[in-house]
Image (spheres, rainbow, N blue to C red):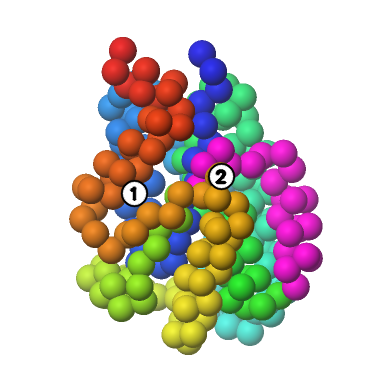
Amino acid sequence: MPRLPFITFEGSEGSGKSTQADRLAARLQRCGIPCILTREPGGTLIGESIRELLQFAPHNKNMTPETELLLFEASRSQLVREVITPALERGVCVIADRFSDSTTVYQGAARKLDREMIESLNAFAVGDCIPDVTFALDVDAATAELRMRREPRKADRMEQQPADFYERVREGYRELAAGEAKRFVMIDASGDVEEIEKQIWETLCSRFPVLAKVSNP
Ligand code: TMP
């Protein structure tokens, strides 16, 4: 059987990307297609400790943007080598809830750290582990905020940025997707969850006939 794809989900908080990543993983499991779902930062014991430090640790308030960037890359380099590459080599489909595009957009477009530096750190962290397809879920700030309010939980450090930060995030994804039109699929995420799920599944089946074949034997 051909190698199963490495699929990533990107988008701002409240875009619904985690919901769609979960739904896709559940669908693949129902179809008997081996798959794993990862998240970033996190996804390994080391990565989950880094997530805690980045998001919730009481002493993280004065973390510098440079430290933040390196911690995201550290979490990713562990995840790639410990989980993602071995899974793809075993013939398992990998679905990632965020990957290196998050760094390009959040630390690059939104935090305004040097773009070339970010690209070289991303390349160092991922090596030759490049997503086959990336779904970028696009939603306006008001809809995203509404969705986040519906989901009562403690806001983490990354969710306490001013409104223009999230505008730069949205614009950053749009620019990135326009520059890499072959890998990126922009999804209007303002609509119905089931419709979006269907659109994602149809795109995957047309790009990776192996998925359509295995799910409809
Ligand atoms: P989330 O995955 O639950 O949305 O939370 C992850 C947070 O971390 C989110 O605010 C985006 C941010 N983030 C970055 O700023 N850079 C990165 O490279 C990654 C993976 C996440």
Total number of numbered discs in the rendering: 2
Indicate whether 119 appears above or below 85: below
Q: Please tell me whether residue 148 belongs to the stretch shown in magenta.
A: no
Q: Residues within 10 Å of mark 1 (few under 14, many from 20)?
A: many
Q: Residue at x 44, y 85 (%)?
A: 163
Residue at image coords 24%, 59%? 191
Residue 49: x and y, percent? 58, 58
Residue placed at 62% from the left, 29% from the top? Answer: 86
The mark lying in front, picked from 2 and 1, is 2
Vertical relation: 189 (above or below) 196:
below
Q: Is residue 152 left or right of residue 75?
A: left
Q: Camera-side residue: 36 or 135? A: 135
- Residue type for callout 1: Gln
Q: Amino acid at mark 2?
A: Lys
Residue 211, image x and y in percent? 40, 25
Sequence-first disc among 2 and 1: 1
The span from disc 2 to disc 1 (Cα, nearest Å) is 21 Å
Q: Which residue is mark 2?
A: 182
Q: Residue at x 24, y 53 (%)?
A: 193
Instruction: Classify mark 1: helix, strand or loop.
Output: helix
Q: Give the structural element (helix, strand or loop) at label 2.
A: loop
Q: Is residue 92 left or right of residue 104?
A: left
Mark carried by residue 20: 1
Give x and y (percent) for residue 161: 49, 83
Q: Nearer the viewer, residue 140 or 48?
A: 140
Q: Which residues are magenta?
A: 114-134
For residue 66, which numbered disc appears in the image? none
**Residue 158: in sight, yes or no?**
no
